[in-house]
Amino acid sequence: MTMQGYQQAYQQVQNVTEDPRQTEYRLFAQVTGAMIRAEDLGHTEIVRAVHWNRRLWLALQSDCATEDNSLPDATRAGIISLAIWVDKHCRKVLKREADLQPMIEVNRNIMEGLSGG
């Protein structure tokens, strides 16, 4: 089996064994870790990490805006509100008018909620 074959097999198993909360937690952990590392690596890496974070939040916003989303309305509204804030803060970071720490803290808070902690 090729390396690509192993990766595909792993992803299939992961998709079967990982529940949506675990998947969301893992994605938040990866994005947040990228932002933390980017602080030490310079503006180019910050731009990459911020765009990844922005895409994550835009996806959450889009998902919460659909009628078939099963989350309570108040939770959906809160996530949409946070996503709007994240989008605005991302733009400030990209213009070097703000730092990453507030977004890192928001993501960590979400991760804590996803882990049940």
Image (cartoon, rainbow, N blue to C red):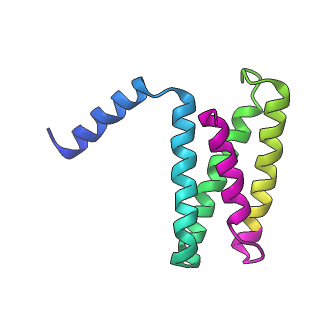
- Choose top left, top right, bottom left or bottom right for residue 93: bottom right
Q: In this image, 11 relative to 6: left or right? A: right
Prevailing secondary structure of the magenta residues: helix
How far from the left and from the top, in percent, is residue 46? Answer: 59, 70
Closest to the observer, 109 or 84: 109
Q: Quadrant of residue 75?
A: top right
Quarter holding the C terminus?
top right
The correct choice, above or below, for 73 with respect to 49 in the image is above
> Is residue 103 magenta-colored?
yes
Residue 28 percent coordinates (x, y): 58, 47
Q: What span is in magenta?
A: 92-117
Quarter in which the N terminus is drawn: top left
Say left or right for 40 vs 83.
left
Q: Position of residue 33 (x, y in %)?
A: 53, 58
Asked if 69 appears above or below 52 in the picture, the reply is above
Q: Give above or below for 106 relative to 1.
A: below
Q: Residue 79 versus residue 64: which sits nearer the camera?
A: 79
Residue ID at (41%, 25%): 17
Q: In the image, 51: left or right of 85?
A: left
